[in-house]
Image: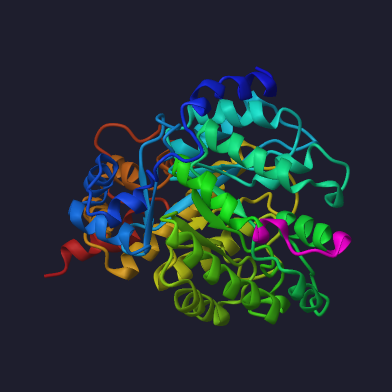
């Protein structure tokens, strides 16, 4: 499949949607009092009333991803009143990967529990890669359109605003459910960046800052925000307002640049809401644990309760090779405090393009973080899985313990490895009522049974 072919495949669909078509967004319909089929579907998945879903969407506290051209995906609700969701980033780079590899990563991500995926391709055949991902993705798909725009030029200053908007509309026609739009990186904030240790670490943020500085003009995504709303309304694409000035190290966390951009994202959120466009707001990068709560508090205040979608945050800069753990720690904390979706980080973060194994580890780590946040927030039924695991452990029901874990294959493999080290076959039939950590004589659970 070629990128030209991917574009042509949507031309007939695009022709059926005039520029003056009525607003069909889930937010528009929710505000009109309608409970859509998508709202009923997510209500059933979340075990809540459909009217509750409608009210949360209408208030802007949740988004319901449902691009009309992505029928392959089940609708998903993202909001602080619902389960914490996780996103997995996949995508090719100029240094490697292929459509086939990205489809395998997609399968791995969804299999292990990713609620959405983002195609962050920056290599060749971006449109074709995205088309393949969309047609195989049973979960919502997000993108960062500025990456495709950059693939057509030599330098950020060569970007043409009209062409970027054409790319955004083409992605919407293909079925992209939400897009990261770095419209909050304003010219007036650039002097604040010079005080930083790590400058701008967002690729999109850096591209738009360079364009703005080179042309002596305001960020064109900010200037053309109403045009973006026109596009998003036609297909029901949700804004994921990008934090292009997110901190890339602990030293820059919660600084003037980050919070100045956040204020602008709050203003843009309200502008989109006036057009009945769904919005979530992206959150920081690297933040020490003692500064995480301030991020959640400020975002709620300035963005009116719009869903917060955070990258981690990573609570240390020194986790190379284990950054998925640094990120999951911060993710669990900010999820507990009210964040709606966590963007996973893999062990390859800061080091290279993740492979399938890294995708799996990143997803599992952040599923654990999201679940821990749900339990801490007291969501109905969130602790049922934990209570079931406790019963299985007390009964030495190893098969049930494997089943309830977030990575059953790894749990079983580690248990079988311990048995093989003792010359025993893998666990089959009636299992032993102890494990190799304590052994039979020192097993606390066995001993507990004998206490009068």
The spot of residue 72 in percent (x, y) is 41, 29
- What residue occupies the far left of the structure in this picture? 452
Question: Which residue is drawn at the image coordinates 32% and 46% (left, top)?
Answer: 404
User: Left or right: 269 with respect to 324?
Assistant: left
Q: Is residue 203 above or below residue 114?
A: below
Q: Nearer the viewer, residue 374 or 115?
A: 115
Q: Nearer the viewer, residue 260 or 233?
A: 233
The spot of residue 173 in percent (x, y) is 53, 33
User: Left or right: 406 with respect to 178?
Assistant: left
Secondary structure that dominates the magenta span: helix
Instruction: Give the image quarter of residue 207.
Output: bottom right
Q: Is residue 244 above or below residue 385?
A: below
Q: Is residue 90 above or below residue 47?
A: above
User: Left or right: 90 with respect to 85?
Assistant: right
The spot of residue 319 in percent (x, y) is 68, 63
**Residue 201 inside the magenta-drawn segment:** no
Q: Nearer the viewer, residue 251 or 271?
A: 271
Quarter of the figure with the N terminus: top right
Instruction: Give the image quarter of residue 61.
Output: bottom left
Q: Is residue 435 above or below residue 72?
A: below
Quarter of the figure with the C terminus: bottom left
The spot of residue 426 in percent (x, y) is 40, 33
- Magenta part of the protein: which range? 213-223
Question: Which residue is drawn at the image coordinates 44% and 44% (left, top)?
Answer: 236
Q: Nearer the viewer, residue 433 or 263?
A: 263
């Amino acid at each position: 499949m070629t990128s030209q072919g991917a574009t042509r495949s949507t031309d007939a669909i695009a022709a059926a949607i005039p520029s003056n078509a009525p607003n069909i967004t889930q937010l528009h319909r929710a505000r009109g009092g309608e409970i859509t089929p998508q709202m009923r579907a997510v209500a059933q998945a979340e075990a809540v009333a459909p009217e509750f879903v409608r009210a949360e969407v209408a208030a802007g506290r949740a988004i319901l991803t449902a691009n009309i051209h992505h029928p392959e995906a089940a609708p998903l609700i993202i909001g602080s009143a619902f389960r914490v969701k996780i996103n997995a980033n996949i995508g090719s780079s100029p240094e490697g990967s292929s459509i086939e590899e990205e489809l395998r990563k997609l399968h791995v991500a969804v299999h292990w529990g990713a609620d959405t995926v983002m195609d962050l391709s920056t290599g060749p055949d971006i449109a074709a890669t995205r088309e393949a991902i969309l047609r195989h993705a049973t979960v919502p798909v997000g993108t960062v359109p500025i990456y495709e725009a950059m693939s057509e030029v030599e330098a950020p200053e060569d970007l043409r605003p009209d062409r970027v908007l054409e790319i955004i509309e083409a992605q919407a026609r293909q079925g992209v459910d939400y897009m990261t739009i770095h419209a909050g990186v304003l010219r007036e904030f650039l002097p604040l960046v010079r005080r930083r240790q790590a400058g701008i670490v967002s690729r999109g943020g850096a591209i738009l800052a360079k364009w703005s500085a080179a042309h002596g003009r305001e960020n064109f995504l900010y200037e053309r925000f109403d045009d973006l709303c026109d596009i998003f309304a036609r297909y029901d694409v949700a804004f994921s307002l990008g934090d292009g000035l997110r901190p890339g190290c602990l030293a820059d966390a919660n600084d003037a640049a980050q919070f100045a951009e956040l204020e602008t994202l709050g203003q843009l959120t309200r502008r989109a809401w006036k057009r009945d466009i769904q919005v979530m707001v992206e959150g920081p990068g690297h933040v020490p644990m003692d500064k995480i709560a301030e991020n959640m508090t400020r975002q709620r205040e300035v963005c009116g309760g719009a869903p917060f979608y955070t990258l981690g945050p990573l609570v240390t800069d020194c986790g190379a090779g284990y950054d998925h753990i640094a990120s999951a720690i911060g993710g669990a904390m900010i999820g507990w405090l009210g964040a709606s979706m966590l963007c996973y980080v893999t062990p390859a973060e800061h080091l290279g393009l993740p492979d399938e194994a890294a995708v799996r580890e990143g997803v599992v780590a952040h599923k654990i973080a999201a679940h821990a946040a749900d339990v801490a927030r007291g969501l109905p039924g969130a602790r049922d899985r934990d209570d079931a695991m406790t019963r299985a452990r007390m009964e030495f029901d190893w098969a049930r313990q494997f089943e309830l874990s977030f990575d059953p294959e790894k749990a079983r493999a580690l248990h079988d490895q311990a048995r093989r080290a003792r010359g025993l076959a893998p666990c089959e039939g009636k299992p032993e009522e102890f494990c190799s950590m304590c052994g039979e004589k020192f097993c606390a659970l066995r001993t507990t049974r004998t206490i009068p």
